[in-house]
């Protein structure tokens, strides 16, 4: 039997299976005028961080691009304020990674983005942003300082003091609170608010000595102060203020107590002694011991010089302590022993 050869037209064609091509995401870049990357003088570390972030984002974009087909065009946000840029990207369904680069003239605008504006990126893809932010300072503790010291401290840190005065029993000018709080990071030029104690409304204690008790009490009560009276033995007329504490002019809070010493009426009356015929020194001492005052008058007389020849009020008169008794002393010029008695 001969071998039958299959004609070429009838030969079986065997097709080897071919692996399906991997799905790819086409990124379309639109040429736009994008501000150049910020200078890196003094910020080499930030350059490395930005490069690392952008590399990670690029790898992530490739991975998502190979596994997703539903993409959205990335908007261009370079030059926008960070808040606006973030809002736009999140509205498109993108996640946002932010790197803040400190700069002296930083104003919070976006300097760079990755992917660039116009790239196609799937929903939930990540977009990296670099924004310039002014260097910050750590806010010190202001509470407890005097207002002047707090203002000088903030000014030295190139911050703007914003004090406000509030009613408080704390000493006048004391800082009570601050906003932002101690330890917060703030940018130069930022305003710092703080409250300052106005201090209590103090009242000056009036001079009371020599007033009657009733008048002294009325004055203190009219000022919102609390009088506390004490009766003391004194040569002053009865019910007369002879001392006070605190002293006149002292500043007190409303309601504070003021001690008032008043002459005791029970011990204010005395009987005037007879000092006629005694030496003027002895007469003065006798009157003073009884709480009486003396008014010494020298007159021409025959008695020895310095001898008391008359007095007013007369002996045994009842007078208040502190009353003045006038006594007349002979000058001895008349040369006789006759004396005149009151």
Image (cartoon, grey):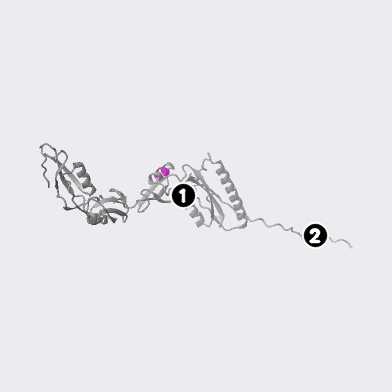
Residue 123 position within the rendered picture, expressed as x and y whole percent measured from the top left: 56, 57
Residue at 48% x, 55% y is: 87
Tell which circle, 2 or 1, labels the residue nearer the N-terminal end: 2
Query: Disc number at residue 10?
Result: none
Relative side of 34 to 324, left or right: right
- Given residues 18 and 330, the one toward you in this image is 330
Quadrant of the rendered image containing residue 11:
bottom right
Pointer 2 with pointer 1, Cβ within 8 A:
no
> Which label sits in the foreground, 2 or 1?
1
Considering depth in this image, is 306 or 269 the residue closer to the camera? 306
Horizontal relation, residue 166 to residue 25: left or right: left
Measured from the top left, where is residue 304 in percent x and y? 15, 38
Q: Is residue 154 magenta?
A: yes
Q: Position of residue 105 (x, y in %)?
A: 46, 42
| Main SS category, magenta section | helix
Q: Is residue 105 above or below residue 4?
A: above
189 horizontally vs 288: left or right: right
Who's the residue at 42% across and 41% down the image?
156
Task: Indicate the secondary structure of the residue bearing disc 2.
Answer: loop
Query: The magenta stretch spans which residues?
Result: 151-155
Residue at the image point whose x is 38% and y is 46% from the top: 147
Which residue is the extreme one toward the bottom?
1
Q: Which residue appears farthest toward the right when viewing the image?
A: 1
Q: Which residue is mark 1?
A: 182
Viewer can see residue 292: yes
Viewer-proximal residue, 337 or 182? Answer: 337
Horizontal and vertical percent for residue 294? 19, 45
Reading the image, the residue beneath label 2 is 7
């Amino acid at each position: 039997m001969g071998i039958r050869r299959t004609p070429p037209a009838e030969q079986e064609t065997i097709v080897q299976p071919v692996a399906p091509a991997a799905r790819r995401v086409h990124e379309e870049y639109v040429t736009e005028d994008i501000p150049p990357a910020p200078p890196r003088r003094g910020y080499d570390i930030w350059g490395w961080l930005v490069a690392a972030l952008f590399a990670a984002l690029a790898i992530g974009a490739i991975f998502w691009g190979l596994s997703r087909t539903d993409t959205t065009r990335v908007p261009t946000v370079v030059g926008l304020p960070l808040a606006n840029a973030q809002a736009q990207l999140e509205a498109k369904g993108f996640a946002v990674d932010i790197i803040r680069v400190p700069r002296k003239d930083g104003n919070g605008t976006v300097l760079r983005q990755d992917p660039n504006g116009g790239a196609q990126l799937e929903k939930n893809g990540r977009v990296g942003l670099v924004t310039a932010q002014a260097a910050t300072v750590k806010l010190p503790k202001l509470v407890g300082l005097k207002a002047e010291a707090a203002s000088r401290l903030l000014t030295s840190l190139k911050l703007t003091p914003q004090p406000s005065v509030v009613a408080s029993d704390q000493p006048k000018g004391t800082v009570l609170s601050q906003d932002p709080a101690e330890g917060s990071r703030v940018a130069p030029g930022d305003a710092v608010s703080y409250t300052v104690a106005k201090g209590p409304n103090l009242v000056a204690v009036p001079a009371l000595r020599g007033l009657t008790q009733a008048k002294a009490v009325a004055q203190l009560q009219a000022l919102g102060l609390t009088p506390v009276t004490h009766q003391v033995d004194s040569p002053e007329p009865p019910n007369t203020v002879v001392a006070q504490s605190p002293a006149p002019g002292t500043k007190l809070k409303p309601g504070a107590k003021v001690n008032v010493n008043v002459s005791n009426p029970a011990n204010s009356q005395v009987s005037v002694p007879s000092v006629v015929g005694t030496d003027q020194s002895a007469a003065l001492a006798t009157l003073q011991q009884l709480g009486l005052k003396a008014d010494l008058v020298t007159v021409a007389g025959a008695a020895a010089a310095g001898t008391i020849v008359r007095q007013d009020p007369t002996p045994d008169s009842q007078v208040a302590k502190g009353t003045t008794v006038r006594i007349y002393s002979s000058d001895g010029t008349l040369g006789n022993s006759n004396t005149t008695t009151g």
